[in-house]
Amino acid sequence: MPNQEIKIQRLNLRVRGLSEQSVRSALSSLGPAIKAEMARHPEALKQSRSMHIPNIHLSPIQVRGGVRHLRGAIARSVTHSIISHPDHTQR
C-alpha cells in the first residue's frame, strides 16, 4: 500500500479456546498480514490515501490450526471491516 495509511485505534477481538500466548503471537505481526490481504483487493487500495478507524469489532473467529491460521483469519476480518468502513466507501 504505497503512500497509504490506515490507523485503527482499537481492535476488539473475542477468542475462545486459545492461549493468551497464541493470540499475542498472532497479533504480533498482524500489520504485514493485513497489508498482504489488502493487496488482494486492488480496488480497495485505490480509494483513499489515509483513513482513521476508531474501533473495529470483529465477530467471533473460529480457527483450526496454529497461530498462522489465526493471524490470517484476523487479517481477513480486519480487511473486510476496512473495505466496508464508511470512511473508505465514501471516497
Image: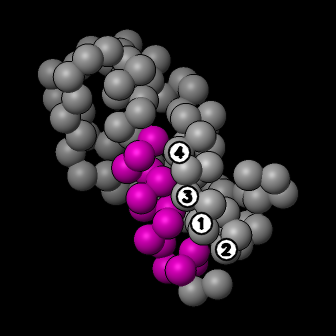
For label 3, the residue is: 41
Q: Residue at x 44, y 51 (%)?
A: 78
Q: Secondary structure at mark 4?
A: helix
Few, some or many residues within 10 Å of mark 1 (<14, 14–19, 20+): some
Q: Which mark is residue 90?
A: none
For label 4, the residue is: 37
* Magenta span: 75-89
Contact between labelled residues 4 and 1, with CB atoms less than 8 Å apart: no
As drawn, 5 above or below 75:
below
Q: Secondary structure at mark 1?
A: helix
Q: Residue at x 45, y 41 (%)?
A: 75
Q: How many marks?
A: 4
For label 1, the residue is: 44
Q: Position of residue 87 (x, y in %)?
A: 57, 78
Q: Nearer the viewer, mark 2 or mark 3?
A: 3
Q: Secondary structure at mark 3?
A: loop
Few, some or many residues within 10 Å of mark 4 (<14, 14–19, 20+): some
Question: The disc labelled 4 sits on which kind of residue?
Answer: Glu
Question: The disc labelled 1 sits on which kind of residue?
Answer: Ala
Contact between labelled residues 3 and 1, with CB atoms less than 8 Å apart: yes
Horizontal arrangement in the rendering, residue 52 relative to residue 23 (left or right): right
Measure the C-alpha gap from mark 1 to mark 3: 5 Å
Q: Residue at x 50, y 62 (%)?
A: 82
Measure the C-alpha gap from mark 3 to mark 4: 7 Å
User: In the rendered image, which quarter is residue 62 located in?
Assistant: top left
For label 2, the residue is: 47
Q: Residue at x 57, y 75 (%)?
A: 88
Residue 28: in magenta span: no
Contact between labelled residues 2 and 1, with CB atoms less than 8 Å apart: yes
Q: Earlier in the sequence, mark 2 or mark 4?
A: 4
Q: Earlier in the sequence, mark 1 or mark 4?
A: 4
